[in-house]
Amino acid sequence: RPKRPDSRPNGQRRNKERLKVVDKLEAKDIISTRIPKSQQKERPVSGELRKPRKPSDKLRVRSLYKLLRQIKVLDEKQSAGEVLNAAQRKKLGRMDDV
């Protein structure tokens, strides 16, 4: 909604009252938006730190177990008579490497 002009009834009276209150305030009472550098404090660190990465051995073992599970599922599918595509057959061929 647009700001109302001060020409409405009682608008001038309200402005005069507001200005009287502002004139009574001292400089220390007025809120400053800028803090001097001498009074600025260092902000504490917030948030979570990154978790350390897993060692490569554990990661490799976990990925091999996952691959082994996938190969077993593909082997069961093949023994059930389902036709596998080329990528699935290639993964089945990796059984000896795992």
Image (tube, rainbow, N blue to C red):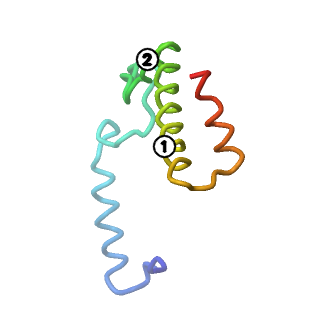
The C terminus, quarter of image: top right
Q: Residue at x 56, y 48 (%)?
A: 78
Q: Residue at x 40, y 39 (%)?
A: 32
* Residue 56 point in image, percent of width and height: 53, 14
Vertical side of 73 occupied by 6: above or below: below
Along the viewing direction, whichever of 47 and 78 lies nearer the viewer: 78
- Foreground: 49 or 46? 49
Q: Are marks 1 and 2 in contact (CB under 8 Å)?
A: no
Q: Label 1, on which residue? A: 73
User: Residue farthest to the bottom?
Assistant: 9
Q: Which mark is residue 95?
A: none
Residue positioned most to the right = 86
Instruction: Tell me if mark 2 has few (under 14), some (14-19) or many (20+) residues whose alpha carbon lies within 10 angstroms of its own.
Output: few
Q: Is residue 84 above or below residue 70?
A: below
Residue type at the position of mark 2: Ser
**Element assignment for label 1:** helix
Report x, y in % for residue 38.
Answer: 43, 17
Against 9, residue 18 (above or below) is above
Q: Quadrant of residue 88?
A: top right
The relative height of residue 29 versus residue 40 in the rendered view (above or below) is below
Residue shown at 72% from the left, 46% from the top: 86
The count of marks equals 2
Q: Quadrant of the N terminus?
A: bottom left
Q: Earlier in the sequence, mark 1 or mark 2?
A: 2
Q: Position of residue 8 (x, y in %)?
A: 39, 86
Q: Nearer the viewer, residue 78 or 37?
A: 78
Name the image quarter holding residue 74. top right
SS at mark 2 in the image: helix
Judging by the rendered image, the residue that carries numbered circle 2 is 38
Gap between marks 1 and 2, in whole Å? 67 Å
Of the residues shown, which amino acid type is indicated by label 1? Val
Q: Give me the residue at 44% from left, 80% from top.
A: 4
